[in-house]
Structures are given as C-alpha cells and as structure tokens.
Image (cartoon, grey):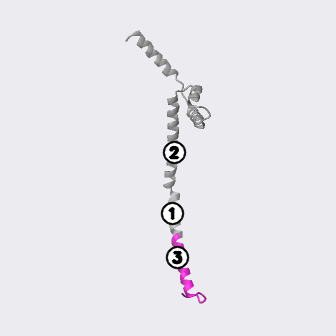
Amino acid sequence: MSPISDVEKRIKDIRRKTRRKYSAEDKIRIVLEGLRGEDTIAELCRREGIAQNLYYKWSKDFLEAGKIRLAGDVEREANSTEVGALRSENRHLKQLYADLAMKNDVLKKISPDSDTE
C-alpha cells in the first residue's frame, strides 16, 4: 500500500468512529420539522449537520413505520376475541328479533281488534 492510501484509510476510520449518532427522538424531531415546512429541507439539514439524503431516508422510514403500525392496529382489532364475542352476540340478537317479530305477527293475526286483510 502507498502512504497516501494508508493516510486516507486512517482518516476514514477516524471519521467513522467520530460520526454523530442520532437518537430516535432526534430523528423524529428533525423529520417532523421537515414535514412542517417552515424551512427548506436544505436549510434544516445544514442547521442539523446532516446530508439531505439522510433526512429523506429518515423521513421514508418514519412514514413507512407509521403505515405499518396503523395497518397492524387494524389487523389486531379484527382478530381480537372481543370482535368474535360481539359477532356472536349480534347473531343471537338477530335470532331473538326474528322470533319476537314472528310472535308479534301471530298475535296480530289472532287479535280480535286487528284488521284482517
């Protein structure tokens, strides 16, 4: 290896080790600031010291995670035991209504003051 490539490798290693790590809260804060649109994405990225492509990656990940989470909530509710119990109760109430409606029709037909058709 030439001395220049050793120096370049060492500089890359130092940069990699000193690269700032952003917490999830920082990423969310930055993405939400970008979505508000008060500043341009370029201004926001300059102020935060990040590349624009990193902002767009975080933004895509943020929106995708939200979409997955919302879809997961719908699936979980649709499969819950509570929904099954409600469906069972609904069937029971429909059957009860049908029985009562039929009895009501019979009583109307045998009642002396009902109009016979």
Of mark 1 and mark 3, the one earlier in the sequence is: 1
Quarter of the image with the C terminus is bottom right
Q: Mark 1 points at which residue?
A: 87
**Separation of disc 2 and disc 3 at Cα?**
43 Å
Q: Which residue lies furthest to the front in this view?
A: 40
User: Earlier along the polypeptide chain: callout 2 or callout 3?
Assistant: 2
Q: Which residue is at the front of the view, 68 or 18?
A: 68
Q: Residue 40 placed where, x, y %?
A: 58, 31
Q: Is the magenta stretch mostly helix, strand or loop?
A: helix
- What amino acid does circle 3 point to? Asp
Amino acid type of the residue that numbered disc 2 sits on in the rendered structure: Arg
Which residue carries the number 3 mark? 99
Q: Nearer the viewer, residue 116 or 112?
A: 116
Tell me residue 21's x, y (percent).
54, 27
- Judge whether 82 appears above or below 103 on screen: above
Mark 1: few, some, or many residues within 10 Å (few <14, many ≥20)? few
Q: In this view, does 11 lie above or below 40?
A: above
Residue under the point 54% across and 81% down: 105
- Badge 2 crowding class, 10 Å Cα cut-off, few under 14, some 14 to 19, many 20 or more, is few
Q: Which of marks 1 and 2 is nearer the N terminus?
A: 2
Place residue 9 in its image quadrant: top left
Residue positioned 52% across, 21% down in the render: 18
Alpha carbons under labels 1 and 2: distance apart: 25 Å
Q: What stretch is highlighted in magenta?
A: 94-117
Element carrying mark 1: helix
> Of residues 42 and 27, which is closer to you in this image?
42
Q: Say what amino acid the circle numbered 1 marks.
A: Arg
Seen in the picture, residue 98 relative to 33 is either above or below; the reply is below
Residue 28 position within the rendered picture, expressed as x and y whole percent measured from the top left: 57, 35
List the residue tagged with mark 2.
69
Q: Residue at x 44, y 15 (%)?
A: 8
